[in-house]
Amino acid sequence: MAFETTKNIWHNGQLIAWEKAQVHVMSHVIHYGSSVFEGMRCYAQPNGAAIFRLQDHMRRMLDSAKIYRMPLGYTHEELCSAAVDVVEANGVAPCYIRPIAFRGYGEVGVNPLNSPMEVYIANYPWGKYVSGNDGADVCISSWNRMAPNTMPSLAKAGANYMNSQLIRMEAEINGYSEGIALDVNGYLSEGSGENLFLVRDGILYTTPLANSVLCGITRTSVLTIAKALGIPVVELPLPREMVYICDEAFFSGTAAEVTHLRSVDKILIGDGTMGPVTTAIHDEFFAIVNGIKPDRYGWLTPVRVPVAEPVEA
Ligand SMILES: Cc1ncc(COP(=O)(O)O)c(C=O)c1O
């Protein structure tokens, strides 16, 4: 997916020109994947624009860094205001925001501790994602998610995405839009970049954190919305076949938002259309992020950026 560039990138406390944000080929991260990062959206609203769950994304970034013993050198508050600064300086909304921290140019050995930390925050235009209501045709991947004692799935680390790439490439080469990975014990885990939800008999199921999933910010938003809508929620290890016999299935994620699954391994989910539980959650999610309904959970951080096409209230 090509993207449009912006003018500024935040680097270690300062805004620099997009073209100047470069790293040396001998940086630790290039060789050993030593990065942690985030991805978040800034949505158009009726009266401007707002970043969705900025504080939660930056908290996860700090958590990821802590797991990998990376001293970022910036507080949660500083990172949040840096994200607002770069979005406002670039004046682009709606957009995608990509904070990343990595081990830079220092030593060449595997031990990262003597390579300095570099922190960047970039953003670029990303309009409304139109998944359509046709749903996604996905498969179960032949690749498993990492075993819990190999790579920590709660850390959003660059290296984890080598596993995601295997899942995604296999799916697309075989004509599917995404793959669902099982965990090391054969239970359902998650997509290459999305959490998984199933609905059966009106109950919403999702895979727990112990099944090698990322604790998605959209996942927790879906759980909050479901509870508020009175939908019973169960977090339970789920066998693969549960996805074939459920009434509804959907992915959640910053990129996928709430995307319903039409089929898995060419088995139709329900009648293939977006079911009532997914529709209720999908509609509530978009009403909140687009500022049509009140921000009752405090999920939105307004930014002073004029939007090209404001959302109609
Ligand atoms: C592996 C993986 N799982 C789940 C998610 C969904 O997380 P979020 O809702 O925070 O974007 C992502 C996206 O970041 C991901 O990469």
Image (cartoon, rainbow, N blue to C red):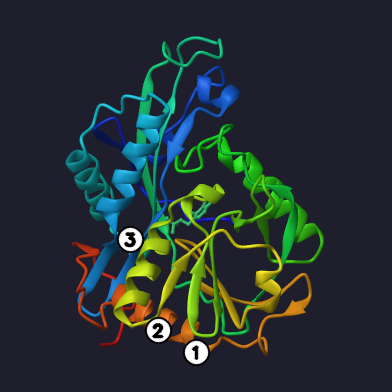
Query: Viewed as shown, does residue 16 lie left or right of 126?
Result: left
When asked about the image quadrant of residue 104, the answer is top left
Residue 49 on image: x %, y %: 26, 68
Disc 2 crowd, CA 10 A, few/some/many (<14, 14-19, 20+):
few
**Tag on residue 283?**
2
Q: Mark 2 against mark 3, which lies toward the viewer?
A: 2
| Relative to 126, residue 100 above or below | above
Query: Mark 1 is on which residue type?
Result: Pro
Q: Nearer the viewer, residue 44 or 163?
A: 163
Mark 1: few/some/many CA within 10 Å (<14, 14-19, 20+): few
- Circle 2 — which element? helix
Residue 116 lies, in percent from the top left, at: 38, 17
289 with respect to 207 (left or right):
left
The numbered mark at residue 309 is none
Q: CA distance from mark 1 to mark 2?
A: 10 Å
Mark toward the start of the polypeptide (1 vs 2): 1
Q: Earlier in the sequence, mark 1 or mark 3?
A: 3
Check if mark 1's residue and mark 2's residue have beta carbons within 8 Å.
no
Q: CA distance from mark 1 to mark 3?
A: 35 Å
- Upstream in sequence: badge 2 or badge 3: 3
The residue at 35%/45% (across/down) is 60
In the structure shown, which secondary structural element does the residue marked by tag 1 occupy?
A: helix
Q: Is mark 3 within 8 Å of ligand 1?
A: no
Q: Quadrant of the C terminus?
A: bottom left
Q: Which mark is residue 276?
A: 1
The one nearer the camera, 186 or 114, is: 186
Q: Residue at x 44, y 23 (%)?
A: 103
